[in-house]
Image (cartoon, rainbow, N blue to C red):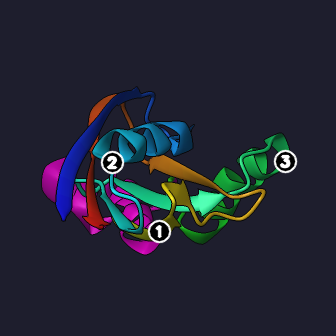
Amino acid sequence: MVVTRKISLQTKGDGDIIDITSQVEEQLAQAKVNSGTVTLFIPGSTAGITTIEYESGLLADFPTMWERLIPKSIPYHHDRAWGEGNGYAHIRASLLGASLVIPFNNQKLALGTWQQIVLVDFDNRPRSRQVILQIMGK
């Protein structure tokens, strides 16, 4: 069985990190699929999905890491072409990735004790985002 669901949310942009674990668990429970995998996908090229321990230290370290790797303050060809000032956001999102696959059993995600699912919006402005979930199993 394949069930497709969506999670809609509003972000602040600028590296906003949003814990979506409970929304994914809720969608999984409503789908009534016992065991399988859930694929999460974020449409768009300036946001990504991953897992992290959602705690204050890492929530401070994560944006600092992105700024060291892909700084906002350097020139990007994308910005010259489009004038949006978000070239860094596209590169950060492509490195993080737009999708994530998580197995589940007895409608329980196989996440570690300190592991949460997060959406990271790198864009330079607030956005309305949708996460598409495809729940596959039996």
Secondary structure at badge 1 equals strand
Residue for point 44% across, 37% down? 26
Q: Earlier in the sequence, mark 2 or mark 1?
A: 2
Tag on residue 32? 2
Q: Residues within 10 Å of mark 2 (few under 14, many from 20)?
A: some
Tag on residue 102? 1
Q: Is residue 15 visible?
A: no
Q: Earlier in the sequence, mark 1 or mark 3?
A: 3
Residue for point 23% across, 62% down? 78
Q: Which of 130/17 is in front? A: 130
The kind of residue tagged 1 is Ile
Q: Which of 83/125 is in front? A: 125
Secondary structure at badge 3 equals helix
The quarter of the picture where residue 48 lies is: bottom left
Task: Kindly report the distance in space between the C-alpha atoms of the residues bearing marks 3 and 2.
Answer: 36 Å
Q: How many callouts does the rendering have?
A: 3
Estimate the x, y position of residue 22 in percent, counting from the top left: 54, 38
Q: Which region shows up in magenta? A: 73-96
Estimate the x, y position of residue 8 in percent, counting from the top left: 29, 32
Q: Quick one: which residue is furthest to the right in this view?
A: 57
Q: Are marks 2 and 1 in contact (CB under 8 Å)?
A: no
